[in-house]
Amino acid sequence: MNYETSWVAIFVFALFVGIVLFISFYLGAKAKTARGYYAAHGEIPWFVNGIAFAGDYLSAASFLGICGLVAFYGYDGFLYSIGYLAGWVVALFVIAEPLKRMGKFTFADALDKKFNSRSIKLTAAVSTLVVSTVYLIPQMVGAGTLVQPLLGFSYEIGVLVVGIVVVLIVVTAGMVSTTWVQFIKGSLLVAFCAVLVVAILARGLTKSQSEYAGPVALPTDRAPIPPTGGWVGKPYVRYAKAGGGYELYRRIDDKTGTRAQSVTTAGKKTLIDGLPKGVGEGHAGLQPVGQIQSLAGGATSTGSLGPIKFLTAFANSTVILWPADKDPIKETDGSSTTIYYQKATLGKDLLVPGAYPAFKGVRGSKLSEKLDFLSLMLALFGGTASLPHILIRYYTVKNQAAARKSTVVGIASIGFFYMLTLYLGLGAMTGGTLDPTNNNMAAPLLAKGFGELPFAVISAIAFTTVLGTVSGLILAASGAIVHDLMSNVLKIEMTDHGKVRAGKVVAIFVGAAAMALGIVFKEVNVAFLVGWAFNVAASANLPALIMVLFWKRTTKQGIAASILIGMLSSVGWILVSAQAYTVFHLDPTKAIAPFSQPGLVTIPLGFIVLVLVSLMTQPQNAERAAIATAAV
Amino acid sequence: MPSEDPPAVGRRNSRIGLWLFLIYCLLYAGFMALTTFKFQVLAEPVAGVNWAIVYGMGLIVAAFVLALVYMVLCDNDEDAAAEDKS
């Protein structure tokens, strides 16, 4: 679709980013020590910290990715919501308390407190770095996607803008300001999405009158363009248009068809329905899609609906989805044309799992695809507690009770938000504003359907969401490098001031890496990318975290081995999976991994390695007594 | 660290946490098993919607309710411990 620059959006956006930067500079001046920079002096009020949990967690993925998946495939996006929230239960009930009791800044430090071993410091720091980086990719993809329609910039520039602003925030501030930024952003996001859902329910569902929704008569005033090359034998017919280009139909019979749309890439040029992509004479853009073809009982509109009635009415309607034809039309000149066509789908089929191609195993009978799905859900379950930037936030309140209360506030706001995502997604699916080529854009475009101002506000919030999450992650990564690697493993002597300065330099490098990766993974759904990050986090960190807290015979060698094996096996598995082959433009059927989500295999593997290595390296009795005393 | 829980309270809290965790685990596993192997069951209509919606939303509500229960149980302990100290 073509995106025009919106001045209201730019103004609201600039205002938001300005406020965030101001807070960052203002509070940053207060954080001069390492403890202030990384753990906010342990002085953040519990309620603020709780909402900040939500701010950290409701990242670009939660917001853009889930709404997009629901808008394109229905219930499947909501499965991510369920999985992400479930992860919180693990974090709260199992990990939060004992970890807080250890009272350290980073994951590596907490593990190290018990063992004081360089190998653990090293592996834990490396794993924090790897997990942060993998989790940064979807955030950057989300950022680039947002800036495109908002400011009219290209995707790549969007990624650069976010990267630079975030590095500025991190370099000037640290944990105090990121916590307050997360608090503001978390509350705004939840509140504004609630408003948007109320608007969706008030709008209800309306049967579309668009010629792009449902069967229409084929043109009779001219003959179709005779099919040549790759068009031969396809169900599509083209009718030349007066101004150039063509009208595209998917044929039903000789007289009727449904409108379709085509995107042709030829070298660096992009054509829409045969005309160069752009605005004005001789150019074309994709039509926004997402319509209702029919409602129950032949009604034209439902009027405003309650939350349950909305779902009932949706289940009884027929919705038009716009999938891309699996076989692009290849021409001898090297051009490739992807066709997006209408697929009328019963609403009730979209309120059950299994419509998303990555989850198709749910409805099929192939065991490997079913395992793929279970593997993802296991990774989401165990991944939250293993994310480095969520762990850091446990340390920013003053005691156990405060940590508990803030996690409950976190669960409440995150859970409420996830319930909203289902409505946001279905609202986008039926609101007639979708871009068929990019599901990450569904939520902002949904807001656009309600006017320029909601669009501007939601984009600005989403953008600050990305900023907040990315700054938290970069902070975690720089903490891992400076605190754990440089000062603890390499034993570089640094003053407190020197540590903070080194952290800032590292933040710049991590930011640059994130920008580069964000550009590579442009076309993948952000929720899917986050799923991978959770797989890596859970595989590398979960066994170590759980066992160090609950198994007395855990040894330092066991911890180091499980982190290393969990991390390498999950990253390795992902790199040779079918989904990764698609991203790298290789043939996905040649992929080595039997399914794309490694968690089901690599999380248990981490536990097994930890237990085996620990049993092989049990200390002598005297040493064990010494460790037991030290741990009390 | 200032104002930590005494170890006995910490142990009791951990136990409560693990029990609540177990309850949620079963709910979550049940949902995932249904989704993976019997998704038709989730398509059955109930309460104006279907089981997928009811169970899915239910999991989110359950997480919140269990978290509340946890906070209430743990805080009682801590208040008692604080009184013992004073």
Image (tube, coloured by chain):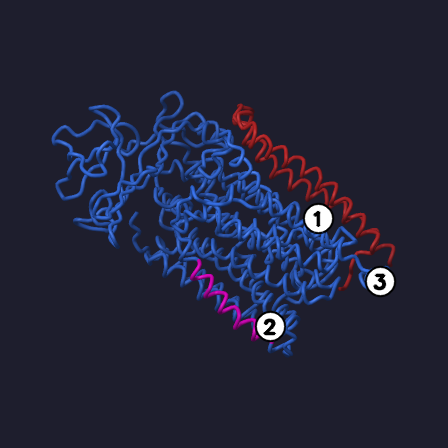
The mark nearer the N terminus, 2 or 3, is 2
Chain A, hue in figure: blue
Select label 2 or label 3 by which is in front.
3
Residue marked by disc 3? A629
Chain B, hue in figure: red
Select label 1 or label 2 by which is in front.
1
Residue A502 lies in magenta, yes or no? Answer: yes
Name the residue nearer the viewer: A325 or B13: A325
**Residue A94, which numbered label?**
1
How far across and how far down the image is residue B39, in percent?
54, 28
The span picked out in magenta is: A499-517
Circle 1 crowding by C-alpha within 10 Å: few under 14, some 14–19, many from 20? many
Which chain letter goes with mark 1? A
The answer to whether residue A464 is left or right of residue B12 is left
Corner quadrant of residue A74: top left
The mark nearer the N terminus, 1 or 3, is 1
Secondary structure beneath label 3? helix
**Quadrant of image for the C terminus of chain A:** bottom right
Q: Is the stretch drawn in magenta largely helix, strand or loop?
A: helix
Secondary structure beneath label 2? loop
**Residue A300, which numbered label?**
none
Which three-letter amino acid code belongs to the residue tagged 2? Lys
**Residue A30, which numbered label?**
2
